Structure formats: structure tokens, C-alpha cells
Amino acid sequence: MPAITLRGFVLLLATTSILGVAAMVALPHDKFLRYQALSDGTAPTAYWIYQRIHDDATPIDVAFIGTSRTGMALHSRRLEDELQQRGVTAKAVNLYIVKTGINLQYVVAKELLEARTVKLLVLEMDEREDRKPHPDFIYLADTADVLAAPLLANLNYLADIARLPGRQADLFIQTRLQGSGLQAPGAFPPRYEGPNLDHGQFITTLDGTRHDRRVVNTQAQMATLLAADEARITPPLLPPSMADIEFRLPRYYTARILDLAKAHGVRVAFLYTPRFGGPQWPQPYRQYAVRAELINPWERLQDYRLWSDVSHVNWDGAQRLTDYVAEALANHAELRH
Amino acid sequence: MLFNSYAFLFLFLPLALLVFYGLRRRGWLGASVASLTLASIAFYTYWRPQDTIVLLGSVLFNFAVARALVQQSAGRSRLLLALGIAGNLGALCYFKYFNFMAANLAATGDIAVFARSIVMPIGISFFTFTQIAYLVDCHRSRSSERNLVNYALFVTIFPHLIAGPIIHHAQMRPQFVDLARKAIDPELIKMGILVFVIGLAKKVLFADNLVLGADAVFNAADHGDSLGTAAAWIGVVSYTLQIYFDFSGYSDMAIGLALLFGLRLPVNFNSPYKSRSIIEFWQRWHITLSAWLRDYLYIPLGGNRHGESARLRNIFVTMLLGGLWHGAGWTFVIWGALHGAYIVVNHALQSGKGRAARPVDAYPAAAAKQAATLLLVMLAWVFFRAKTVPGALLVLQSLAPATVATIAPPPALGPVLAFWILAGGAIALLAPNTQQLVRYSDRLAEPLRLPPGPTRSALFGARPGLPATPAVAIACGLVFAIAFAQLWRPQIFIYFNF
């Protein structure tokens, strides 16, 4: 075969590379492997979420989606019991994933709504909007969602796109190996934890560490934690008139979840999970007030003894918040039918 | 900035090429060379800006010493040379060995050591050795570089700055002069792309997958966990292949990048695991360091000029110091001592047989020698990789069957790791190496001198070669695509730590 010019060589190489990368992005895989890939100590619930949605026929009447705030605050079995005492029989699930970034909550909501019939979807709402995308979005999101993610104000867009071919290739190989019975030692699938994955008095993370949630901080300790937390907060960087740009990511994905729920005929409520010392009403809610109600347990959480740290309630706080949510949901018509 | 990072591949390199060739297209060839110097300094500054002060300080110091040195009489020149070398070694000792020496002194318990944490500027071992060689060469030749920009480019040119190959001014200066006068041969650029992609694949596909097997075993050993025999062998084999693909991959990438700018760096690897003796191994592994140690340490120590025993002692000392050059730790000292001992024994065996030309070994003997050499190299790698001497000894102990009561499960030897071990082994032992594939040696001022023995490749026959045909471009594009898919978890090159 004759040699080619430098220009021809570079063009042919670049074209082949692009086509090769595109082919890798299109490789199929077992989606459960994708959820297992996130099964590290920081996100212990990802594979359980998949199992609960797809492999467990237990109904999902009320689904909570959020971050560790929701994960620590809402005890789904207690909620079911409290609702039962109020004459409502409903199955609840807490589909939280640690760390903030609403694009990952969109992924979970989509997975849930496309696979199951849900009566009420409860989304976490914090005291302020978080402009950052979730760092683990690339682990769980469908290929189309990675490619179609908003580019503007999305700090992870290029990194996620760049990582996509590798993710697809790795998952494809794992799927093939699994199909051939050639699992690597220590490979999942993990044990199914049952229809409710809640955190009670203790939390045992996957690394085996056991945390006692009954611990009560002193007022001085909470004040110190609050001061440290406030120092970490980055206030809005752009003027209010440009908030739609700065906070494009949370607004885009919240709107997509609301649209998705509407398309599936599912009612949505927001659960305000304030931080310790946070405002009585979440400022972001004003944008969505016409589309969904707000469950606001703020008044019940003003005692410093209910908090493990600034962002998470302790076991007493979780019981109090769960009971409040049960009171709020007991009169929902969707759950009474 | 790693060569295998998005920032380098899709921002720094295109920008550097754009400026370089943009200036050349306008006819500003000299400016294009200067732009390469600036790009190299920017490349280095990206790591830790404060290290740039050390780098530039070192460049200015050596440039000034060399200029002064060539203008003096022989006696004063020798004095200046000694001062220059002392300055370089002083800086190297301070940045690289202070923590090691302080820790060892403190461990004696009798001496209170002023403890401070010194962060080693990346690449200091390489740019220090490059410049010591330069000073010695200036002293010998009585001539030095007059152009500071060219000198700075010689030291800092980014493809080799962090981890070699170690270059000589005499190799590079004519190329810089040509670069400022002539157009660049497009064939060099095509070859550069090819070599770079091969190096990238070696690093991100082979080395970065093999690291999983090596880390699992050596980290466990360093923690004192018992290992099974199978696990220990998997770890040692994985590391043996990992370091080859990591460092030769880096060297390929460096050569490829230099070719993109019309420069030819010396070859650093020549299928070292095909060696049939330790002496041959060091003619094939990290070739530029071996040559440096020979020319600037072994020969000044006396070389072979004072009898056989002095020669063997000089070899041993050279290898010992070569080990210490790799890192401030006892494991590296032991690694260097082992190789020193290997070479001494190798020379002694050769002397015993006589130095007469011997016929090329027949297959069984050749294979046995190759296997024995590889085994010795692998055993020495255990000290090179382990972070502690007890960890290394535990791995070595575990290599022998049934010496450890507890049989820990092997590391994650899944089918993926098994694939990379088998494929990597086949390439390292059977395939032609990169410079054979692209016939790079034909482009060197001094074509690569291959050690005696057959150079025929088991897979490609006697005359491998990859001309820049459309099929090669397509294959290269596919390899780049697969390597690109693995770039999201860039791993540092092993030799960046030295």
C-alpha cells in the first residue's frame, strides 16, 4: 500500500479515532453493572436503588429522592408505620445518594418513573440551590443523558463526555465476561438488603465503620460547626438577573423531573431538609410553588440536640422529621386510594 | 502535566504545535525555536510553579559555569568544573536526599536532626544529570553553548524534561541549528505521531491495567499481610511488565513528541526483556542512563584502567549509586547493589570463558539464558517496587512455594488482568520494539548499535516496519481511540518520582 501525505495521514487517523470513540459510546451493557460501579463507601445505596426499582415487586407508593440529608432524615419503615396508624397503607422508599448535584437525582427519578407506578414523588429541597453537578453522574446516567446534559454552567460536562467511551467499553467488557461466566474475584452482584434501606440508630458504611447516630452535640459544638459550614458556602457569583445562568443546572434538572413526573401522571412534593440554623422557608421553592407543594418541617428541627452536624439530623431528629412527614402525607388523596 | 492527560493532549500540545508551526509558516524559524523553549517552561510550571525557580536557577547556573569554564586555563577549568558539579549535586542532595538522610540520622537516636519536609522538584534527577554531563563535555571539548535560549531549550525541552531520555548537548545542538534554518521533514512528523500513539497505548492500556495486579500484592506486603505463592508471582510479573510498559511508553511518547517538532531524541529502550545476560540487559534498558553512568561515573572512577578487581569494584559502585539515583531509600540501594552484583558475576563468568568471539547461542541455550536473566531482573524489581525492605523480603519469601503458612487469596486476577499479563508478556518477549517498527534508528545521527545476537522478531520476521500507509493510519487511529477511552483515570509515570 502506498504511503500517504502528512495531511492525509492525520485526517485518516483523526477520522478513525472519532469513529472508534463513537463506536465505543454505542456499546451495549447490563445497566445493573453500571449501578454496581458506584458501590463504594461513599455511595452505598446505588445498587440497592436499582434492585429495589427493578427486582423487587413490592409497591412503591411514595418515593423520596435526595442526598444524604434525605437519607439521614427520612426513615421509610417508620413512615409506613406512622401512615398505617393514620389509616393509610402505603409503601415508601428512600432513594437517596450521597453528595449534592441534582442531575443525579434526575437519573434516579427517571429510572424510577420509567419502570414503576408511583403515587407520590418527594424531592429534597435545600435552603439554597447548588450550582454544581453531581460528581457521580457519569456512573449512573444513560448515555443519552450524558450527551444531552446542558453545557452552559455545567462544570463536569467535558469531563463526563470524555469519560463516556471508557465507561461504555469497561461496562461492555464486564457484561461479556459476566455472560461467559468469567467474573473477576470479588465481583458483585451484592446481596439485596430488602424493600427498605433505612438508617436507624447506627450506620455501617461499606468500609465497615459503624457510626452512632444517637450522639448529641452541645450547643457550642453546633455553633462551631455552623460557623465552619458558613465559611464554606460560596454566595451567588452573578447578579440576581443572571441567576438563571448561574443556577442553570439545578433549575434545568428540577424542571425535567417535574416534567417527567407530569408525563407519568405522578404528583410531586418538595421536602424541605434545612441545615441547622437555616431559613424558615427555602428560597428556591418560589420558582416551583405553582407546580408542587412543600412539606416544611423547619419548626420541628430547631432544637440543636436533633443534629449530628450542620447538614444532617441525628436519630432523634430523623424520628421527629419522619413523623412530621407522615402527618403531612396522611391526608394526600393519592395515598388514600 | 502528564502526557496522558486531556490538558496535555487537547490543550497544551495543540497550542504548542499551532504556535510553533504558525511561526515557521511565516518564515520565523528562530522564533519557532524560542516558542518551544517557552512552551517547555510553561509545561514545567504547570506542575508546581515554585519548582520553575529551581529549574531556571539550575539552567542559569550551569550556563554561566560552562561559559566561564571554557574561557579559563585547564587548571582553573577543572576547578570550575568541580564547583559546577558540586553545585548540581548539592542541589540534588538537598532536594532529593535531605529527608532520607535526616530520617536515617534521626533513627540513630543520638543526633538531633532539624526536621523539615522538602518537596523534590519534579525531574530534578534528569535535568541535573543532563547538565553535569554538559559541564563535563564543555570541559573536555573546550566549547560551550553561547545562546541562552538554545541552552535553555536543550535542558528544558518538554518531551524529555521530566523523565528523560537523558540527552547530550552534542546530540541536540546541530538539531536546534537545523531547526532554525531548515524546514521539517513531514516524514518525521508522521513517525512522531505513530511513536507517540504506540507509547500512549503502552502506558494507558498496558501499564495502567497491570498496576492493579502489582499494587494489590506490594501494598499488602508493605502492610505485612501474608501472601500466597500465586499472588506473589502475579504481583512480581505484573510489576515487571508494568514498569517496562510505563517507562518505555513514556520514552516512546517523548521521542514521538520530539519528532513532532522535528527533533530526534536518543533511544532509551531496546526490548530489554529479550536480553540473554544482565550486561546485555543494561545495554537495552534505560540506555541513556546506562551510558551516562558509564561515561560520567564508571570511567571517572577508573573504569577498567587499574586491573580486573578495580574494574569490578567500579562497576559495583556505579550500579549502587545508580540505584540510589532512582530514589532516596534503602530498597533502591539494594536494587542497585543487586544489579551491581549481577554484572560483576556476569563479567566474571565471561572472563572465565574467555573473551573470544562466541557463536550465537542455539535455541535451548538462548532461551535458558533469557529466562535466567529475566528471573534475576524480576527478583531485583521486587526491591525497586516495594516501599519497605521487609515488604520486599516478604514478597521474595512468598515466591517460594509453601514457605508461608497462610495462603492468602491471589489479588484480583480476573480475566482482564490475565489478558494484560499475557498480551504484555507476548509483546515484551516476542514483538519488535517501537524503534524497530518505525525504523527510528535509521533517522538517528548514530544508528542504534544493537547488542550481539539475533535481532529477528518472532512475530514480524527479520525486517519489521510500519510505513505511513492508510492502513497504518487507520490502525493508529483505532489504537488512539481505545487509549483515549482510558484517559479518564490518568496515572503518573513511575519515573516521574525519580
Image (cartoon, rainbow, N blue to C red):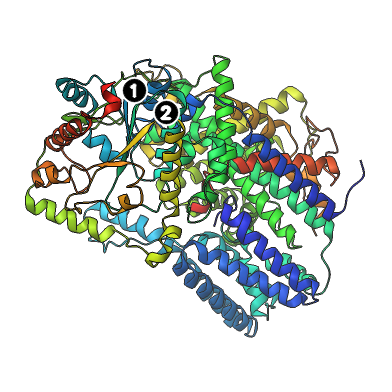
Q: Is residue B207 visible?
A: no
> Which residue is tagged 1?
A60
The chain ID associated with circle 2 is A
Image-quadrant location for residue A111: top left
Task: Name the quadrant of the C terminus of chain A.
Answer: top left
Return the disc, 2 or 1, that comes first in the chain's sequence: 1
> Looking at the image, is B139 positioned above or below residue B403?
below
Mark 2 residue type: Leu
Specify whether A86 is left or right of B334. Answer: left
Image-quadrant location for residue B129: bottom right
Q: Nearer the viewer, residue B419 or B86?
A: B419
Verify CB contact (< 8 Å) between mark 2 and mark 1.
yes
Q: Nearer the viewer, residue B337 or B466?
A: B466
Residue B232 at x, y percent in the picture: 46, 26
Q: Residue at x 57, y 43 (%)?
A: A147
Mark 1 residue type: Ile
Image-quadrant location for residue B18: bottom right
Residue B96 at x, y percent in the picture: 43, 59
Q: Residues within 10 Å of mark 2 (few under 14, many from 20)?
A: many
Specify whether B445 is left or right of B80. Answer: right
> Which residue is tagged 2?
A112
Q: Residues within 10 Å of mark 1 (few under 14, many from 20)?
A: many
Q: Residue at x 31, y 19 (%)?
A: A195
